[in-house]
Image (spheres, helix red, strand yellow):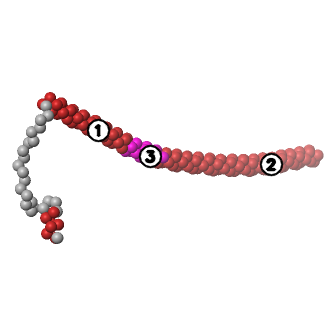
């Protein structure tokens, strides 16, 4: 049975025992006109089939083109969205940097203003102290002048009193001398 099954298998290389008949076209007694019409119908059917195939291929190509275009649009849309996201991220980063720079600048300006205010207060305090010392010095000078003036006035008064006493003594002496004379 194994030999039979291998012989019956398709593609078997063993030749069949029966010899083939040589091809002999069968003569048909159908009129030529009818044969011609039948051939024309076959040609027409083949032409229609070809046209149908062309139309189907065209439709398939169009659908494939539409799918490709849709895929390309999806890719482009995705790229555009990614670009937009990147751009927005970059804008946010730039904005953060700008805000940080503005804050740093504002802090620097505030610190500088505080330093200027501290310096102004310090200068004002120094000026006030200097003015206070100047007034104290003026008051001390005025007291000293007043004291000197008083001392001078007292000295003048004593000098005048001495002079008066001397004059009075001289006058008495003269009168005494006159009396004695």
Which mark lies nearer to you, 1 or 2? 1
Tell whether 2 sits left or right of 61. left
Q: Which residue is mark 1?
A: 56
Locate the C terminus by quadrant.
top right
Upstream in sequence: badge 2 or badge 3: 3
Q: Disc 1 or 2, which lies upstream in sequence?
A: 1
Q: Nearer the viewer, residue 2 or 108?
A: 2
**N-term mark: 3 or 1:** 1
Q: Position of residue 56 (x, y in %)?
A: 29, 38
Residue at the spot x=6%, y=51% of the render?
A: 21
Residue drawn at point x = 90 percent, y = 47 percent: 172
Question: What residue sits 33% from the left and 40% below the top?
Answer: 63
Task: Based on the picture, tell me whether residue 152 belongs to the magenta stretch.
Answer: no
Instruction: Check whether the beta carbons of the residues at disc 3 and disc 1 lie within 8 A of each other.
Output: no
> Left or right: where does residue 32 sit relative to residue 122?
left
Residue extending farthest to the top is: 33
Question: In this orientation, does residue 148 appear?
Answer: no
Furthest-front residue in view? 29
- Residues packed near mark 1 inside 10 Å, few (<14), some (14 to 19) or many (20 plus): few
Q: Where does residue 87 sit, x and y in percent of width and height?
A: 43, 44
Residue 53: name its quadrant: top left
Q: Which mark is residue 85?
A: 3
Mark 2 or 3: in front is: 3
Q: Where the N terminus falls, by quadrant?
A: bottom left
Dot 2, crowdedness within 10 Å: few (<14), some or many (≥20)? Answer: few
Q: CA distance from mark 3 to mark 1?
A: 42 Å
Query: Residue 150, which numbered label?
Result: 2
Whole-percent x, y for residue 168 in the image? 88, 46
């Amino acid at each position: 049975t194994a030999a039979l099954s291998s012989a019956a298998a398709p593609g078997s290389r063993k030749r069949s025992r029966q010899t083939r008949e040589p091809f002999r076209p069968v003569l048909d007694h159908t009129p030529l006109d009818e044969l011609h019409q039948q051939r024309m119908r076959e040609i027409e059917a083949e032409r229609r089939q070809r046209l149908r195939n062309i139309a189907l291929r065209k439709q398939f190509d169009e659908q494939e083109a539409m799918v490709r275009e849709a895929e390309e649009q999806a890719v482009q849309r995705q790229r555009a969205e990614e670009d937009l996201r990147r751009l927005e991220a970059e804008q946010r980063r730039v904005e953060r940097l700008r805000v940080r720079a503005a804050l740093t600048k504002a802090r620097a300006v505030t610190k500088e203003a505080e330093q200027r205010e501290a310096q102004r207060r310090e200068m004002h305090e120094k000026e006030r102290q200097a003015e206070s010392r100047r007034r104290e010095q003026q008051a001390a000078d005025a007291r000293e002048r007043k004291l000197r003036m008083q001392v001078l006035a007292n000295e003048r008064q004593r000098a005048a009193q001495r002079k008066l006493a001397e004059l009075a003594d001289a006058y008495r002496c003269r009168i005494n001398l006159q009396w004695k004379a």
